[in-house]
Each structure stands twice: as structure tokens, then as C-alpha cells.
Image (cartoon, rainbow, N blue to C red):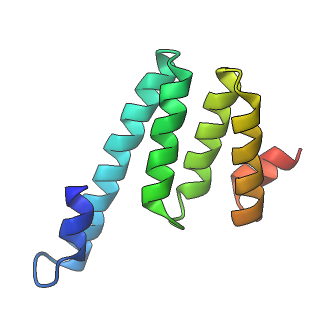
Amino acid sequence: EWTKKFAQMKGLGRRVFKRQMLTMSHAARLKSCFVMDIQKQYTKAAVCYLAMAKDLGNHKDTPTVLYNAHVAYHNARKMKKAESIKKEILKRFPRSKPARMLKR
């Protein structure tokens, strides 16, 4: 994605500006996944969330994005995929809010 490439370039823009660009990019991308979810295109939404989570890496929002993918697969009745994502959240982000929600 171009915003990620821009943020990694040295000498272009200030750190605060780059951070703001990445935040806006994440918000726009999350919104597009959310729209698919609202339209009940659960599998497409889950794939969108997973792609976003992959790009985020260990960002603070990754557990929530993965949780959204888990819920979307659950709504699509793809339980094996939902369970796989649940296990990933619990393993990678055991102290996150989504992990606590999944442990209930």
C-alpha cells in the first residue's frame, strides 16, 4: 500500500504526519471491510480483515481486526476458519481485549 511505502521513506514528511497518514489509511480500510460485513458478505469481510491484520503485523489494532475476521467467519458458518483465528488471537495476543472476550 502506498501509505506504508511513504511512511518508510526517509526525508519525506514528518513522523507525526506519517503516523496520521497510516492511521487514516487503516481507518479507511477497516471501513471497507465493515461495509462488506454489514452487507452480509461475511466471507469477503473476513478475507478483508485478515489481509488487513497481515499488513498490520503486531500493531495494537491487530487483535481487534483478527477478532472481526473470527466473527465474520462465524457468521458465514465457516467454523473451522473461525476457530483457527480464535487460536491465533489467543496465542499471539493472550492479554488483549479480544482474547479475554474469547476466553469466556
Residue 14 in the image: state x and y as whole percent: 17, 78
Q: Residue at the location (46% across, 15% down)?
A: 39
Frontmost residue, 94 versus 57: 57
Which residue is at the far left? 12
Q: Is residue 93 visible?
A: no
Quarter occupied by the N terminus = bottom left
> Which is nearer the eye, 52 or 97?
52
- Name the residue furthest front: 80
Instruction: Name the residue rendered at 39%, 35% in the picture.
Output: 31
Task: Decide which of 48, 25 is in the foreground and name it.
Answer: 48
Give how far across and how far down residue 62 sits, in percent: 55, 56
> Above or below — where is 26 with respect to 56?
above
The x, y position of residue 86, in whole percent, is: 75, 46
Instruction: Give the mark count.
Output: 0
Outermost residue on the bottom side: it is: 11
At 76% from the left and 62% from the top, the residue drawn is 91
| Vertical relation: 36 (above or below) 89 | above
Vertical comparison of 29 with 25: above or below: above
Residue 42, placed above or below residue 10: above
Q: Position of residue 46 (x, y in %)?
A: 54, 34
Can I make out residue 6 in this image? yes
Which quadrant of the figure contains the C terminus?
A: top right
- Residue shown at 46% from the left, 30% from the top: 34
- In the rendered image, which quarter is residue 67 located in? top right
Q: Residue furthest right?
A: 104
